[in-house]
Image (cartoon, grey):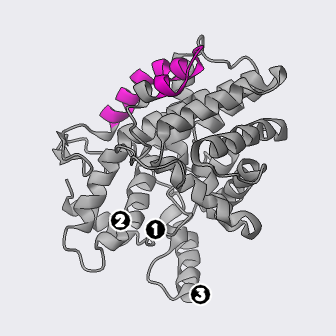
Amino acid sequence: MANERGVQRLSRDACPPNQKGVTMPAILTHDFFARDVADRAKAELPLATLDESDAFLLGGQGPDPLFYIAYYPLMAKWAEVAHIMHSKRPARLLAAMREAVDRLPRREKDVGAAYLAGFSCHWLLDSTVHPFVNAWVYGLTHAGVPGLGPEHDGMVHMEVERDLDEAVLYRKTAKTIADYRPFANTLRASREVLAIVDKIYFYAALWTYDRPIDPATFSVSVGCYRTIMRLLYATREPHRRAFAAIEHALTGTPYSTYGALSHRVRASASSDFDNAENRAWANPATGVVSRDSFADLYERALDRAPAVAAAVLSRGFDDAAAHALTGDINFEGASAPADAPHA
């Protein structure tokens, strides 16, 4: 599916090889997806209060905030949990989260349930769209472009998702980040909400991966993510390029993490990577060929989302129900590796 336009976009906007603990946010796509789900299934979701609504939208970001704890030296080691959650034991993870919600004090259960429902939507969108993104990644890093080989899969993934994120923002709001600030419009949650979600993560990590993480891991991660979003914010291209140049000088690398992750002011509802032409692409994990566009996949996930959220909130949701729901497909849209609970 790689085309000349996609290769040129990557050449214009150089970004870094994937670093452990750092991933492309796609924060706006997940936020708008959760909002769309809430609109479709508001009667079935526990969204009666502001805290519950915030918890649902925060859940829509899934485990992604955990990547950003890498910037907090005293707790950076827990960033690895984000990678583990994305790839290993997705069914057990959802079932463990549900069990943790069930064990919350009564006054916290609705907030916890709202978070879990949002989290399940993150799994759904990721598992539906990531094969498409990974097809772009494979095509671009195997296109024979000098300096853009398979060792740069991570950086291409970030570039593709950032470009799609910008298009989603404009399609949903007719705004760019000049008017819609990611750091102000996403990741909202009170300390009380974050404290509740901290409990869910602590027990889910323990019961799913036998990982006893710090009890404040999630709330600290969200704080780090909010800070990074502010630091990445730039509405002028000379600003972005100046910061990228400083990073080049300091690190001695030809790529810029800042340039890769910061949203651009781009007033377009299309992306070089949206496959609006419905060209054929193959899922790198399975070889299955599809002609779906990004919009097709987004709508397919949205159609399924109310049923997925209802399932994780249903009475008796357990390991068997979670396996039936997920088919053991992880956040990457691939079959989760059959391994022991330990990562």
Can residue 171 be seen here?
no
Disc 2 marks which residue? Answer: 153
Q: Give the quadrant of residue 54.
A: top right
Q: Are marks 2 and 1 in contact (CB under 8 Å)?
A: yes
Residue 10, image x, y percentages: 34, 67
User: First in sequence: mark 3 or mark 2?
Assistant: 2
User: First in sequence: mark 1 or mark 3?
Assistant: 1
Q: Is residue 202 left or right of residue 6?
A: right
Residue at x 54%, y 61% (from the top left corner): 262
On whether residue 311 falls in the magenta region, the answer is: yes
Q: Nearer the viewer, residue 111 or 277?
A: 111
Looking at the rendered structure, the kind of residue marked 1 is Asn
Viewer-nearest of discs 3 and 2: 2
Viewer-nearest of discs 1 and 3: 1
- Residue range in magenta is 295-322
Give the vertical position of 36 relative to 215 (above or below): above
Badge 1 element: loop
Residue 40, image x, y percentages: 51, 17
Residue 191, image x, y percentages: 83, 41
Disc 3 marks which residue? Answer: 250
Residue at x 58%, y 83% (from the top left corner): 246
Give the vertical position of 149 relative to 340 (above or below): below
Residue 18, disc: 1
Give the vertical position of 100 relative to 26 (above or below): above
Q: Mark 1 packing: few (<14 Cα in 10 Å), some, or many (20+)?
A: some
Q: Do the residues labelled 1 and 3 touch (CB within 8 Å)?
A: no
Looking at the rendered structure, the kind of residue marked 2 is Asp
State the CA–CA distance, disc 3 to disc 2.
23 Å
On whether residue 110 falls in the magenta region, the answer is: no
Figure label count = 3
